[in-house]
Amino acid sequence: MFKKVLVANRGEIAVRIIRACKELGIRTLAVYSDCDAQALHVRLADEAVCIGPGPSTESYLKIDRIISAAEIGDVDALHPGYGFLAENPYLAEICQSCKITFIGPPLEAIRTMGNKALARSIARRAGVPVVPGSEGTIESEQDALRICRQIGYPVLIKAAAGGGGRGMRVAHNDVSLLQAFVAARMEAEKSFGNGELYVERLIEKPRHVEFQILADRQGKIIHLGERDCSIQRRHQKLVEECPSPGMDPALRRKMGRASVRIAEAVGYQNVGTVEFLVDRSGNFYFIEMNTRIQVEHPVTEEAYGVDLVKQQILLAAGVPLGKEWDELVPSRHAIELRINAEDPLDDFRPYPGTVTRLHVPGGPGVRFDSFLVAGSSVPPYYDSLLGKLIAFGENREVALQRLARALEEMEIVGVPTTLALGRMLVRNPDFRRGDYSVDFLEELLSDRKTLWETASPVSTGLGKPEEVSEVVP
């Protein structure tokens, strides 16, 4: 087992990794920017090293500084978390050359599946359906026009090296395609340093469903079912649940086997996620593979009763998957709501600031993964995610009731948040029935009145109780 792990991240995922290491008896080294000097992950780690100023380009994305910290700290492994450098093959390669174990998949798997156009080709060869589209990347606007006329509009232009909804545009005709092509290329170059694009036919009102993969060094690969990630805004996930309310056992078996075939095709090891779109007829299409831990991993943990971050570390240390993993089935239903420092009335603009008051809900079946404490700074340089509120129970209705209770109780003061949006969602009858697609939230928020009611301070969590006229004996 590792003696010391460098956590190459910040925020809630850094806290999550440090806690997992503590339970395994592993010492941790945190890296931080100067504006994160008092952050929770720094306080919880055994050691900490400052690697630069606030902007991530000067700190958390500086591979040379992270590797220098690893060598000075004499670590034997590095955990990248998600985001930042988590799927950067160069970081994995440098770790390998420095004899530091990269807690993640092999270098070639990161490289191969990091290019979404190449990943589509891998899926095709593995016999897994993909969304109709280009065979590889598109060289020019004229190539894009030719392909789109063949597969039919509407289409989705996507960055080959993309993620998080960046470098992605919808086009409904030739004119909008040319505009979308230019805009997507510019955004992809700015976000990823790679302007390569590919195109897919836009599937109308699909579900976004992803399968959790675990693979050991001995060649065993399993899946732990699916998560439904269809509640999104601008291709950014907001709510995730496990199991999916739109899945039946037969479809789960087919998609699970397809996920394992894709992982086998690239010699995958460690933890990863295979993502699909599922149309209204139950047809599924591979879209990408994430070669890292996902933000939404807690819903699988709570549904299956496992610790995926600890398992990542064990797999990286060479511990095989035992027979007990073959028999795992979900014993509970879990739902996660991402809580962001954003203002719904200002086009969901992220807002930095200081959390002046915080109340975290508790009780049965409630979990909150976050870096927040009262007085926490929310810097302007990073993702707006404050934390993830997870509710779970013996079935979906119990999980929903617990999520609603926790949302009414929760209080974050000092920065705008999306808490009220979550409260609106859990009251929505269609959401409660599990009747939704990737277009659900955008359509719901297209009505300005709905948006105003969502963000209004009518329901603000903790408040003064109503007075009663009688005292109950």
Image (spheres, rainbow, N blue to C red):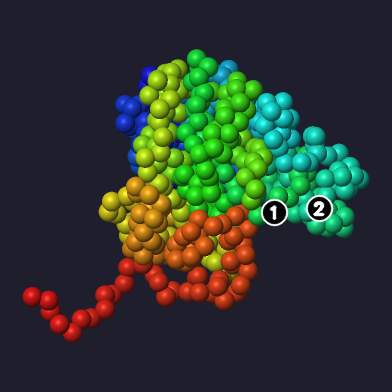
**Is 444 displayed left or right of 201 in the figure?**
left
Q: Position of residue 223 (x, y in %)?
A: 50, 31
Residue occupied by mark 2: 153
Relative to 21, does residue 433 appear above or below in the rendering?
below
Q: Is residue 363 visible?
A: yes
**Is 382 displayed left or right of 377 in the figure?**
right
Relative to 263, does residue 19 appear above or below in the rendering?
below
Q: Position of residue 85 (x, y in %)?
A: 58, 35
Q: Give how far apart the Cα atoms at labels 1 and 2 are.
A: 11 Å
Specify the label residue 204 is tagged with.
1
What residue is at 63 percent from the left and 69 percent from the top?
Answer: 446
What residue is at 50 percent from the left and 74 percent from the top?
Answer: 453
- Judging from the image, what secondary structure is the residue with disc 1 in? loop
Q: Quadrant of the C terminus?
A: bottom left
What residue is at 31 percent from the left and 26 percent from the top?
Answer: 25
Amino acid type indicated by mark 2: Tyr
